[in-house]
Amino acid sequence: MEKIFVHRAIYIGMEMEIWAKSGSEYRHSTIAGQGSKNAALPLLIASIFTARKSILKTVPVELEDVRAVVRSLEWLGATVQVKDRVLSIDASVLDRSDLPPHLSRASRYSLLFLGGLVGRFGVGRIGPPGGCQFGKERGLDFHQLVLEQFGCELRQEGEWLIGRIVEQKASEVTLPFPSVGATLQAIIFLTSSDRSGVLHNAAIEPEIIDVVEFLNKSGCDICLNENRSFTVRGYPSDGVTHTVPIDRIHIATVMAYSAISNTSSLIQWDSPIDVLCLTDTFSALGISIHTDADNHLGVSVDSKAASSRFDVVADVYPGFPTDALPLIVAATIRSDRKVRFYDKVFKGRNNYLEQFNKLGAKVTVVSDREFIVDGVSSLTSGDVSANDIRGSTSLLLAAIQTESLTRIKNARQIARGYERLPLELSNKGFNVHVKNFESNPVHLRSRILVS
């Protein structure tokens, strides 16, 4: 298999900053649950290959990444109507099979357009994907593997990655690692091209199961078998109404800043959610979650139940999410705890750690997967920055533990993943001030926050 290389793209946008420091008095807060970014993006992409009108509810429409994918849908010819957090997508007529670099660079999920476009049109091309920049293992190898083995021929011309459909090859493909992106790529390609196949060692994150549920309601027949295998059949011929689930990583973020403030929180949502993958780990910080009769999530903090030393291991689902690891790191850096962290999913997802040390934290990097945090009693202020959503968010969670103002540069990264986080932190009692979020009315309101 000839290896395809795509130029790495940096997310480009207006310079945005968040200034933050600790508060003087923290309080119980009530937070509106956020629709899952990691479910909404593949759902939006999959929706245009149903060739019918679909309706998606509780979409986190203020997220920069969601806006970017909607622009891509419209470029391809789909009609998208937005009312509150409900998106109506009509893709009965698509008049383009290319996604140019200025659109593809806005999101890592742009990769998923390739399989869908090739499946629907027989040929498609996309520019280089963007999104979070961390580590060296976010290549296209697994995407290329599933597309080529299931019958898509790929080549690269300059920045463009071009695919075309050929005779079906393998009917079963085994992933070397249960990659979320490659699993979604295989499912979208097989359904949009009306091909059958079996994907072994697939990722089974709840967001993937949600996409499968959406496609099955649309007319497909996708089954999750034992040993992490998906059997995929059928073409998504029917438009349906579907609700985006709550964002697990937003829940983890609320748990983290609840631990930092040592105060409880209530997350409002009206559908059940499995948070076991979070609670088993956050319990070491004395954090617990209960669900009330309305399916709202109550986050409670008992500092006496916290452990002084423990390990955190990020793994594929049902393990602790790799996206949540930087968040729980921030909740441990100013304490008397010693915590070992290990990421089984990504190598090198630790560029933000040196930024913690700028603030006086004590973090020792053992390898590109492992590091140790020795909690300190206080943090100093400074200027910090990261090039990914969760790394930037973890720096904000560190900043709200400093006595004087800390500046988080490149804060647009946070706007890619959170609709209201600065306001949530302000309501909790932290001092947060947002600068230059003119393009986002939710973040624009953060200008009233006191610094």
Image (cartoon, rainbow, N blue to C red):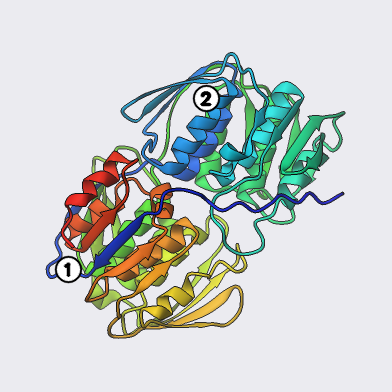
For residue 407, which quarter of the picture? bottom left
Q: Residues within 10 Å of mark 1 (few under 14, many from 20)?
A: some
* Above/below status of 147 relative to 313: above
Nearest the viewer among 413 and 324 is 413
Q: Residue at x 41, y 49 (%)?
A: 14
- The secondary structure type at the circle numbered 2 is helix
Residue 74 pos. (x, y %): 52, 24
Q: Position of residue 152 (x, y in %)?
A: 80, 34
Residue at mark 2 to residue at mark 1: CA–CA distance = 43 Å
Left or right, 5 with reference to 86: right
Q: Are marks 2 and 1 in contact (CB under 8 Å)?
A: no
Residue 397, image x, y percentages: 33, 66
Residues 59 and 96: in front is: 96
Q: Quadrant of the C terminus?
A: bottom left
Point 17% across, 68% down: residue: 23
Q: Say if residue 356 shows up in the picture.
A: yes
Q: Which residue is mark 1?
A: 23
424 shown above or below 170: below
Q: Say what secondary structure mark 1 lies in.
A: loop
Residue on which disc 2 sits: 74
What kind of residue is marked 2? Glu
Residue 186 x, y percent position in the rendering: 69, 38
Q: Residue at x 62, y 39 (%)?
A: 101
Front residue (pair 191, 73): 73
Image disc number at residue 436:
none
